[in-house]
Amino acid sequence: MSDGTPPPRSPARPGPPGLDLERLRDHLDRERPGTVRGPLKAELIEGGRSNLTYRITDGTGQWVVRRPPLGHVLATAHDMRREFRVISALHPTAVPVPGTLLLCEDEAVLGAPFYVMELVAGTPYRTAGQLAELGPERTRGVVLSLVDTLVALHAVDPAAVGLDDFGRPDGFLERQLRRWGKQLAASRSRDLPGIDALHEALAGSLPASPAPTVVHGDYRLDNVLVGADDRITAVLDWEMSTLGDPLTDLGLLVMYSEQEDVPGSPIATTRGAPGHPEPAELIERYAAGSGRDVSGIAWYTAFAYFKLAVILEGIHYRYTLGQTVGAGFDRIGELVPVFIDRGRATLDTLTTTAEEG
């Protein structure tokens, strides 16, 4: 006869760095008893640029654990609570996001805050070659659905989903420019002709923002999962989300949709896949779906070029210090001037259009 003592539990296998499976299992058993039914196994999901993402399974169920990078120091840049909050809030809406299981802010469990969410089936398309396997017609449909999903995100009423205090939309664009200007100053190690002029030109031509929405902050094809039916099953990587100007998301999407593949570059681009819609069609589809005025989208696209130039310069700076390794990082420095020039050329089209008008 049983004396009520639970049967001995098989020991968990060692997890990847940053994920103690025994402690994770104990925490899940306490907070969500009955969820995990067997020893946990885990693997790191590759492709993340900042926060670490793991796939875990007990042999029956599967989940995803997300935590800050090892040795992180800037909590605001890896805020698990914000990510968990926005995903949880959007789950009942038309925006496809994973269901959330729990948030843990007790660093004694894994050494950092983390959250657990559902595993969603789907493929992240990161290169033109991967997307080309779908064929032109399917490729076109996938990219257009990316725009439609962005329209759905920007249609969400923040107050209706409890996100009315998720950010400070007043002065959003000015703060964004200041933030990225500071990022640039922190990474300066060489002369970058034109970048200060681009920054100043952006500051001198700020558009009037439309009504604020939830913005993703890093919206592009390789930050979503696409299902077998070519529909987007989940929008991922919400670490830069906030309340702000929705056209910043569109400008970033347009900027990435203009990029041709550069051999050896770590920058993901799918522009070269046959059937990929032209940026102008993406803009028109967004305008039709959202009803927003997109006549000033060149400013937002130029701002996206500026941001990417600053990000790449930061990576280049860390590479010169021996703090970043990996394929393609030795070429990052060469790409920065390209994005500065493209940003300035894009902003010039806005000026030319205004003069012609």
Image: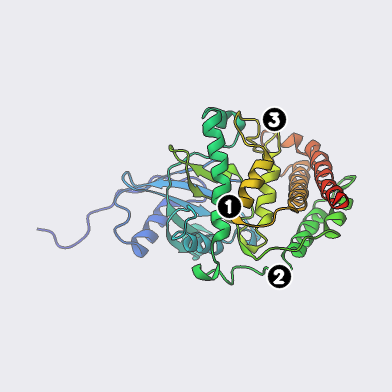
Q: What residue type is labelled 2?
A: Asp
Residue at left offset 75%, top offset 54%: 296
Q: Name the residue under label 1.
A: 289
Q: What residue type is labelled 1?
A: Gly
Q: Which of disc 2 and disc 1 is earlier in sequence?
A: 2
Q: Name the residue under label 3.
A: 264
Query: Is 295 or 154 nearer to us in this picture?
Result: 295
Q: Which of marks 3 and 1 is in front?
A: 1
Is there any visible trace of residue 20 in the rendered image? yes
| Element on which disc 1 rests | helix
Query: Is 13 or 68 nearer to us in this picture?
Result: 68
Q: Which amino acid does label 3 sit on?
A: Gly
Q: Residues within 10 Å of mark 3 (few under 14, many from 20)?
A: few
Gap between marks 1 and 2, in whole Å? 25 Å
Residue 154 image position (x, y, % from top left): 58, 58
Gap between marks 3 and 2, in whole Å? 40 Å
Is there any visible trace of residue 219 in the rendered image? no
Q: Which of marks 3 and 2 is in front?
A: 2
Gap between marks 3 and 1, in whole Å? 36 Å
Q: Name the residue under label 2.
A: 170
Q: Residues within 10 Å of mark 1 (few under 14, many from 20)?
A: some
